[in-house]
Image (cartoon, rainbow, N blue to C red):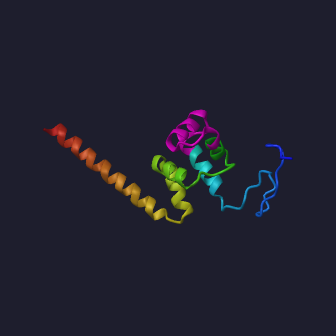
Amino acid sequence: MSFPKKGKVFPGENGWSGKEEQPANGGFVEEIAAALKRSLGDSRAGVKTVAAWTGANEKTVKNWFSGTYGPSGAHLIALVRHSEEVLSTFLAMAGREDLMVAIKLAAAEQAVEELLAAVRHLTR
């Protein structure tokens, strides 16, 4: 006799009962969801964009936006690569806001250099 493929859930050693229980995670899931919404809005286009960035399934990305689950390490790296809002949130959660200041300063320096180059080009 074999078990049916669906409908039977046995609790694991960690006590998982099959219900949608969220482990205490220090707000990681909620913070990443909020950062994604601030960065891309809460729309289907945002979900599609994040799915393209990370290679994750759209249903998975919807779970990130809703705060049901958070991204894995590899997906988080892809999000940070593409979204300054997610990067800022990640650094704040890690207690490294000083790095975000350094990133913004470097971006400002680059913008000033580009502006100077454009002015020099116009004066020629």
How many badges with numbers are in the image? 0
Task: Give how far across and how far down residue 77 sits, in percent.
Answer: 50, 53
- Kindly indicate the quadrant of the structure image that contains residue 6: top right
Q: Nearer the viewer, residue 62 or 8?
A: 8
Image check: 109 left or right of 35? left
Image check: 26 left or right of 20? left
Residue 95 is inside the magenta segment: no
Task: Give how far across and how far down residue 103 sits, in percent.
Answer: 40, 57
- Kindly indicate the quadrant of the structure image that contains residue 21: bottom right
Outermost residue on the front side: it is 1
Task: Give how far across and how far down residue 109 sits, in percent.
Answer: 31, 54
Task: Give how far across and how far down residue 36 sits, in percent.
Answer: 57, 46
Q: Nearer the viewer, residue 99 or 3?
A: 3
Image check: 7 left or right of 124? right
Query: In the picture, which quadrant includes the C terminus?
Result: top left
Outermost residue on the right side: it is 1
Please state the extent of the stretch shown in magenta in the rendering.
38-60
Main secondary-structure element of the magenta-colored stretch:
helix
Residue placed at 53% from the left, 57% from the top? 90
